[in-house]
Amino acid sequence: MQKTDLKEFNKIDFITPTEVSRLLGVSRPTIYNWMKAGILKHYRIGGLYKIKKEDFNNFLNQANL
C-alpha cells in the first residue's frame, strides 16, 4: 500500500486503520485498540474497518495532535 499524500487524502471520505497508523506513526494494534475503546470512531463496511476523514480530524483535534 502506498503512503497517502495530502492531495489524495482530501479527495476521499474514508481512510483505513493502516493509513491512520502511518499518518500518526503508531502501530496498527494501537489504532485497533483506540477503535475498540471507542476513542476513534469507525465503521465496518463490507467486512473492512473504515474511519471517516471527518471523525479522524475530530480525533486529532481532541487529542491535540
Image: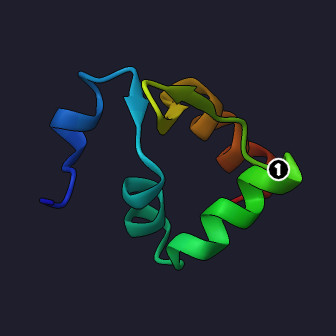
Position of 10 relative to 40 (above/below): above
Position of 32 relative to 11 (above/below): below
Tell me where residue 40 appears, x and y as whole percent. 73, 46
Q: Nearer the viewer, residue 50 or 5?
A: 50
Quarter of image, res 57: top right
Q: Amino acid at mark 1?
A: Ile
Tell me where residue 43 appears, x and y as whole percent. 61, 28
From the viewer's perspective, tell me whether residue 8 is left or right of residue 45.
left
Q: Measuring 28% from the left and 36% from the top, which residue is drawn there?
A: 9
Q: Nearer the viewer, residue 29 or 2?
A: 29
Q: Measuring 15% from the left and 60% from the top, which residue is drawn there?
A: 1
Quarter in which the C terminus is drawn: bottom right
From the viewer's perspective, tell me whether residue 54 is left or right of residue 36.
left
Position of 33 relative to 19 (above/below): below
Tell me where residue 18 appears, x and y as whole percent. 40, 60
Tell me where residue 53 appears, x and y as whole percent. 49, 30
Q: How is the image coloured?
A: rainbow
Q: Measuring 52% from the left and 79% from the top, which residue is drawn there?
A: 27
Question: How many numbered dots are placed on residues in this image?
Answer: 1
Q: Measuring 65% from the left and 61% from the top, which residue is drawn there?
A: 32
Quarter of image, res 63: bottom right
Q: Which residue is mark 1?
A: 39
Q: Residues within 10 Å of mark 1 (few under 14, many from 20)?
A: some
Of all residues shown, which one is farthest toward the front?
A: 47
Of all residues shown, which one is farthest toward the left?
A: 2
Of all residues shown, which one is farthest toward the right?
A: 37
**Element at badge 1?**
loop
Q: Nearer the viewer, residue 37 or 44?
A: 44
From the viewer's perspective, tell me whether residue 49 is left or right of residue 59.
left
